[in-house]
Every structure is written in structure tokens, then in C-alpha cells.
Image (spheres, rainbow, N blue to C red):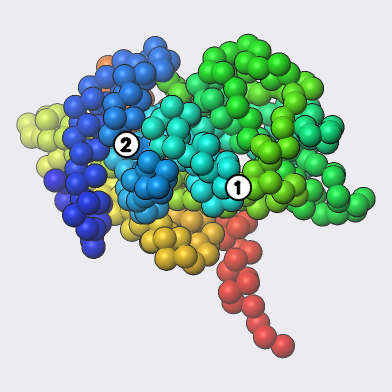
Amino acid sequence: MARLARTEGLNDVQQEILSTVRDFVDKEIIPVATELEHRDAYPTQIVEGLKELGVFGLMIPEEYGGLGESLLTYALTVEEIARGWMSVSGIINTHFIVAYMLKQHGTQEQKDYFLPKMAAGEIRGAFSMSEPALGSDVSAISSKGVRDGDDFVLNGQKMWLTNGGSATLVAVLCRTDEGHPEGTAPHKSMTTFLVEKEAGFGEVRPGLTIPGKIEKMGYKGVDTTELIMDGLRIPADRVLGGETGRGFYHMMDGVEVGRVNVAARGCGVAQRAFELGVSYAQQRHTFGKPIAQHQAIQFKLAEMATKVEAAHAMMVNAARKKDSGQRNDLEAGMAKYLASEYCKEVVEDSFRIHGGYGFSKEYEIERLYREAPMLLIGEGTAEIQKMIIGRRLLEEYRIQG
């Protein structure tokens, strides 16, 4: 096992899960990832393999058919998967966030109906907050849900749905003014709707269209889409938790654990970049010796390894804090910010170590170089993380009197 990014204090079950996943990544993901990524092909076989391993139900309680594991176990699993191919970790992460929101906030009927199917990977989840004109400004969403008898009618356009085509359940955040007088704070008039749909593109149910995949620089394989609602009717019993006006809190809780997982993705990609860099540096010769023996390259490797280790430690700390039942938005924001920034830097240093070959599509580092930037903007930009961190620090260190 690699010396870097070890996690102390894991029990036998956690170690067995991670060992199994790492073995799967080495045998089933890394050998095919670059070829699939260049074709922008959905990794169907990989997803089926992860279903069989039980990864889709990792944090779903045992009474619903899941493994009932901790956020730490989940984050370390995501780290392993991202080390193989970050896109696959994205397929898992969005599903996990919806399952987490259902587990924490769903009605008993919603849990009984959705969670067993999600644990088995039969229902696959996606969630939708962002809209074309607003990015990280969630409070400004304009999609609306209006009560009509026993249903709500949803209208609006959503953007940046990871798994938008392949998912069969989407948690969609809309504005609902029901019971909220004029002047109510925007975040108190939002509701999360559980929208079931067919997998695929086009009109996937009456009033709901998934236009097609958004073409991206990296993060390929996984489908990223828009979602257009035009008179979409949703039964009132598909309001998450059965109560309107709580959607913003549901989504922020989901994103908080999502940020730990984005940090884990950054850790996984950075580890792979380091592995590629340190391996190449020992094989490539210049001036009569391996470039790893040149001090300039050793300095790069030292910096890269230190960043891998630091990011991993912060990610583990954020996961453990959430598992202990404590608020972890400060730690999750710090971990996500640091891991994504360090990931970009480690990938770039590995790219530089590869020299001209780093620019060739034959080398894996070329794919990582295009994937790393997504982490700087996914689940809230680096700037948003710094805002969250700054506000929380001022809460913690407020001057009295």
C-alpha cells in the first residue's frame, strides 16, 4: 500500500471496504478510464461493478438494504474511485447526496419507497439547485412550484445537473410562496421536490425535458445536463419531508457533505497525479541519469507529496466531525478549498515532470490536467468557500462587548 494518505484508526470493516474498492479501481477503472474519457463514453460496466460492490448504498442504513457506513468511509471510498477516474466519483456523489437528504429529511413513506431501490442502484439520484443565470447565488433561483389541488405545478430551467440523463430521481429546488407572505426571506420560501423520471434525453416525462449532454473540457463520461420544467405536475407527497419552505436547508445540508466528497475527489486525483509523476521521474533519463535524481525534480516531488498528505488530513477531519454529529461547514469548506487548490497544483507539477509527453493524449496526466479545474468550481467555487470560511471564523472569533 502507498505510504501517502493513510488514515489511522479505521476498523476492520472499513479497511476491507477500502481494500476491495482500491482493487476494483486498479483492475477495472484505471486500465479503461482514459480511453472511455476520450470518447466521452458513459462507464456502464464500471457502474454495474460498483452496484455489485454495494457502493451505491454505502451510507444508506442497513434497514433499507444499505451498508450503514459513516461519512468517513464514504469519503475514503470516493477518494479511491477518483484516483481511478474522477467522473465515476461524480456519478456516485450526486446519488449519495440525494440518498443522504432522504435519510435525514424524508418522510417515512419517502424513505421506505426510495432508499431500498437507491441502495441497490435501481434508482439513481441527481440533485438540482443551479440555474443558467445565477451560479452559486442559490437564493436568487426563479424556478417555481405552485400548488394546484393535490399537486404542485413546476416551471423553470435548471443547469449543471451531474447525472441529469442517467438519473431516475432528481431532487429539484424551486421557489414556493405557499404560506409565505410577501417579504419572506428568499431562503425560507424554497422547497425540494422529488422528481421521478425515465433515464435518457428529450421529454422524459410530461412537462420535463433533459435537452442533452453539455460538452465539457473535462469531467467526461458522466452526463452533465440542463433540466427544463414546463407545467411539470408533482404530487404533494413528493415534497421532501412533506413540508414546503424547508428546501434551502435540505440542499445546504446535502451540499455540506457533498463538499467533503469534493475534497475527497481532489485528494484522489492529486494522489494519482503524484503516482504518475514519481513513476515517470524514475523512468525518464536526462543528462545521464533518471530525472528523479535531479534536485529540481526532487523538490517538486517533495512539495507534491506534502500537499497530498495535508489535503487528505483535512478531508478526514471534516468527515469525522460530521460523523460525530457536530456542525462541520467550516471544516468542509476548508477541506474542499484546500484539496481542490492543491489538486490543481499537484496535477500541474506532475504535468511539468512529464515534459512534452504531458501534452500527449497517450499519457494519463493529460486527462487529469483537464479534470482538476472542475473541482475549483464544483459544489461552490473557491471564492464561495472562502466566504463561508471567513463568515464562520468571524462567528467563532467575535469580539465581545
- Quadrant containing the C terminus in the rendered view: bottom right
**Marks 2, 1: nearer the viewer:** 1
Residue 375 visible in the shown view: no
**Can you tell which mark lies on residue 107?**
1
The residue closer to the viewer here, 14 or 377, is 14
Name the residue tied to disc 2: 54
Q: What residue lies at 71% left-to-right and 16% top-to-bottom? A: 206
- The kind of residue on which mark 1 rests is Thr
Q: Position of residue 325 (x, y in %)?
A: 47, 65
Q: Residue 45, how many percent across, how many down?
A: 31, 19
Residue 13 seen in this snapshot: yes
Determine the residue located farthest toward the left in the rendered image.
Answer: 288
Q: Residues within 10 Å of mark 1 (few under 14, many from 20)?
A: some
Residue 397 x %, y %: 59, 77
Residue drawn at (22%, 31%), measured in percent from left and top? 24
Circle 1: element type: loop
Q: Earlier in the sequence, mark 2 or mark 1?
A: 2
Q: Residue at x 72, y 30 (%)?
A: 234
